[in-house]
Structures are given as structure tokens and as C-alpha cells.
Amino acid sequence: MADRVEAMPEDSGDALVRVTDLAKYFDVSPPWLTRVLQNEPRLSLRAVDGVSFDIPRGKTFSLVGESGCGKSTVARLVVGLYRPTMGSIEFEGVDMASLKTRAQMAPVRKRLQMIFQDPFASLNPRWRVADIIAEPIRAHGLMSDDGEIARRVGELLEQVRLSARDGEKFPHEFSGGQRQRISIARALASNPDFLVCDEPTSALDVSVQAQILNLMKDLQRELGLTYLFISHDLAVVYHISDYLGVMYLGRLVEWGAAREIFREPRHPYTRMLLDAIPDLEMSGRQRIPVAGEVPSPISPPTGCHFHPRCPFANDRCRTEMPLPIATATGEVRCHAVEEGRLTEELIRAKRAEAGIAN
């Protein structure tokens, strides 16, 4: 059983979202007849494998990791687009899996919304912007008078720094950043408490990314929003996060207060991700190169999933799955950290093996 995040004791009593032992397996087996003729077993892809975390009310919890690590699957599980294979997702104490009918789901669904990665693909190109934003208002029965809905749509557009007159236009008439603002306005239309943001800035130019992130932070302060933020860009995550979870091959390997993890990463994979950020300040921080590719989630490595790429792995790492241990920054799953093997002397030795000057 995956242990719960203990890196946020001051907020843990007011967790809006609580994820416990969350797992999602996809059946990727060949057709039945093919398996019978070729005597092949069923194949299961473990996209998410025992993930647990809390998100305090009014805070941002970010998930980072390479492509294919399970971040977006977690996002889709949390909003109910996928049903979990195992584990639970609680929203303000209500287990989402216990909601079976549309009537039961409706009060919860209007309080959580999702912002997708591609703002153009997630907007109906045949609808005017006003109709797109008004759809959640009508779907949840928040207003019925057309005049009231039109005024609310105008307020939402202005809230995301657009004009109320933009409601008469179609999505193709806007830039990528403006389309993402429309997506945010649509997400806010049902007066949610919780937004799941699946890489909402990755399709945008860097300058536009900063504008969207600043808008999201302003909205969080004004409306008391809680975010689950999915990204592979650590610079973006640093700007918006209160808490950070690092995922690798379906598991959380390190998590805790974001600023502390950025200042003192413990897991070798977290170090690898941070080393990928250019050192523009020329601080001279030591870097350990990590080779290889992410293994297949259909047949993940035994023990610690990261051991084939880890320069500090030993026999224990290859056979025994690490359990969460408390650190000064939060919690980490790593035998090397537990055994005290990540010393500066060993890091220097690994750098020397790689032919890198200290």
C-alpha cells in the first residue's frame, strides 16, 4: 500500500482532494483468437501504479515527469474520464467511485473542471465563444434566463482579460493564448472549486505561457481555487506550484513542498530533471548525466523502476521496491537516500566516471 504524503502537515486537515493508492491498468492484449493460436498471455499496461497524495484547499499540487510517466492519466482519473482499477479519489470527503448515477455526480462535477492541453482541439469550432462558455451554465442549470446568461458570459470573458464582445466570435479568430483564456472562462462558468490543468501552457509560446500562468495565479487568489497542475516543464512548475510530485513510470518517486524540492532534490530522477534546466546563472552546480529511455509500462523493471537508468543503483534497487521515507523536503522513494549512499563523494566519483570535470 502506498503511503500518504506527509509533507504538508499544516494543511493536511483541510485537503479538498485526497487520492489514495490510485491505480489504472489498461488491457493491451492482442485479440482473443490471436492469443489462443499463439499461446500468448494477457498484457496489462500499468499507467498509474499506487499513487497517493493530498491537495490542500486553495493550493496548487503539480505532477511532473517525462512523457509516458502517467501524469495525464492521473488527471483523467481525478475528473472521472477514466475509472480507477484500484484506489480511491475523494473530493471533500466524498468518494468519487461511490457516485453511480448522473444525479449523484452532478453536484460534484460542477465543482471540478478540466483545462486541456490543446485549446483549439477542446473548443467546438462551429460554436460561437458565447455558446461555448454558456454550455456549462445551461448544463448544470445555474441560470435559465438568456439575458442573465449573456451577462455572466461577458463577466467571465472580462475575468480572463478578454472583451465581452469577443463572445460573438468563433475560436479560429483567436490566437492560441486567447483560446486558452476562453477554455479557462468555460471552466470557471460552473463556479468550480477545483481545476485540473493538463499541460495548459505547453502548446503556447513562452511569452504567452507567462501571461496564462499569471492569470491562473490571479484567479486562484481571487476565487480561492485549488489546482492539480500537470506539466513536464519544471520552469512552469516552479512558477505556479505550492507542492510538487515527481512521477516515474506510474509511481511517485518524490513529493513535498515545491520550493524545498527545487532547492534540495533527493531522488536521482528529480536531480536528472532539474539538471535538464540550463544553468543560466552559471552557479557551477554538479550534474549527473542519466542515460537510457523510460522502460515500457507493460513490462516495468523489478524493484525500483528507475534502477536501469540510475547511476547509484545496487542489487537491492533491482529487487526490492522502495517505500516512502521522510526527508527534509518531504518524502522520497529511494534506497540510496535511505542508506545514505548519495554523498558528495559518490557524486564526484560518478562525475569522474562520466568524464565531467568538477
Image (tube, rainbow, N blue to C red):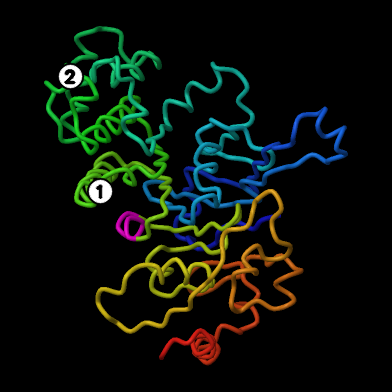
- Position of 278 with respect to 246 (left or right) is left
Mark 2 nearby-residue class (10 Å; few <14, some 14–19, many ≥20): few
User: Residue 282, percent across and down?
Assistant: 27, 80
Identify which amino acid the numbered label 2 is placed on. Lys
Q: Which residues are magenta?
A: 235-240
- Which secondary structure type mostly characterizes the magenta part of the structure? helix
Identify which amino acid the numbered label 1 is placed on. Gln
Point out the tag, 1 or 2, that comes first from the N-terminus: 2
Q: Quadrant of residue 216?
A: top left
Q: Is residue 251 above or below residue 316?
A: above
- Position of 345 with respect to 233 (left or right) is right
- Taking the spot 52% from the left edge, 68% from the top edge, the residue there is 269
- Taking the spot 72% from the left edge, 42% from the top edge, the residue there is 44
Toward the viewer: 91 or 119?
A: 119
User: Residue 356, percent across and down?
Assistant: 44, 86
Q: Is residue 335 above or below residue 80?
A: below
Residue matched to label 1 = 209
Residue matched to label 2 = 169
- Taking the spot 49% from the left edge, 67% from the top edge, the residue there is 270
Which element is circle 1 on? helix
